[in-house]
Image: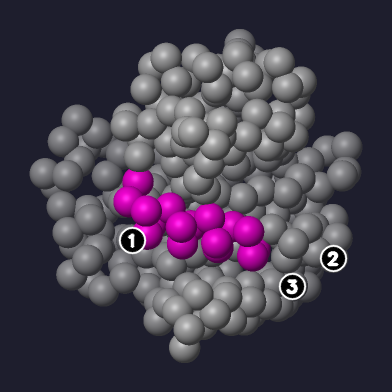
Amino acid sequence: MAQDRAQKNRPHYALTSVDHALRLAVMLQVEGPLSVSDAAERLGVARSTAHRLLSTLVYRDFARQGEDRRYHAGPVISLTADSQSRTALLRTIAMPHLHALVGRLGESANLLVLAGDYARFIGSVESSQALRVGNREGMVFPAHLTSGGKLMLADLTPEERVELYATDRWEGRADERPDLQTLEKELAVVRERGFAINKDRTESGVTAIGRGVRVTDRVDAAVSVSMPTVRFDESRLVDVVSALALTARDIEHDLHAALRIETGV
């Protein structure tokens, strides 16, 4: 089934070095320049390891080293300056609030943005519980399956969704394309509720609840809480949604204040 192929369960044969390199590439793309020390701290590795990873990315044009000795996104993955700047600002502002959310609920928390028909995780804070959902930063999932992705899709115009899920855009992966009529019904429920749930749709054994974040005049990002499905209980839903609403409100407040300072308005 298409849904099964869309699930992302960490492979038993995962190569840590490859995983680290890919995470670094995403950090450079969406957040901006990193020093070797920054990279080492973010990945939790030695400086020598971080340097080898960055050097490999430079060799393959995924990164370049500037005159300031920091590493920047290379030509293979470069975004526009405005897109990178706004995404980096959003993440910087949101991270303390994600830490606070984890403190409130004891579950892992994430920040997502929409990238075409995918939801990209640009920030993630793990719970300290032994059984927990791991760091998802840098990963992408089909937007129509994730809790955060559904919230962002729900705030697009019908015309934008029709274009996003047009048959010709899904050539080569037609079996993964959702039925638009069914999706519209699901998104109508999301808009009415103001939150979305993803239970085992992207990763078996993982349940996520999300809430939208209005970066401009629309839902351009989302915060979510991820937990092992065995720990998900409907009785927790009110507390989780309330905590997500507070987190989204606080991120919006701080982000809009930062943007006012940035633009001088």
Is 163 one of the magenta-colored residues? no
Q: Which residue is found at the position 71% from the left and 32% from the top? A: 37
Q: Which residue does the numbered mark 3 point to in the structure image?
A: 243
Where does residue 55 sit, x and y in percent of width and height? 52, 17
Where does residue 174 sit, x and y in percent of width and height? 21, 37
In the image, the segment drawn in magenta is: 79-94
Q: Quadrant of residue 132?
A: top right
Where does residue 219 sit, x and y in percent of width and height? 44, 72
**Majority secondary structure of the magenta segment?**
helix
Cα separation, mark 2 vs mark 3, equals 7 Å
Cα separation, mark 1 vs mark 3, equals 27 Å
What amino acid is at disc 3? Ala
Task: Say whether residue 127 is left or right of residue 6.
Answer: right
Q: Is residue 152 above or below residue 129?
A: below
Pick the residue in front: 186 or 107. 107
> Exactly how many numbered labels are in the figure?
3
Q: Mark 2: few, some, or many residues within 10 Å (few <14, many ≥20)?
A: few
Is there CB contact under 8 Å for labels 2 and 1? no
Q: Which residue does the numbered mark 2 point to in the structure image?
A: 104
Q: Secondary structure at mark 1?
A: helix
Q: Which residue is found at the position 19% from the left and 62% from the top? A: 162
Name the quadrant of the N terminus: top left
Q: Secondary structure at mark 2?
A: helix
Q: Which mark sits nearer the N-terminus, 2 or 1?
A: 2
Q: Is residue 161 among what the camera can see? A: yes
What amino acid is at disc 2? Arg
What amino acid is at disc 1? Leu
Name of the residue lying farthest toward the left: 168
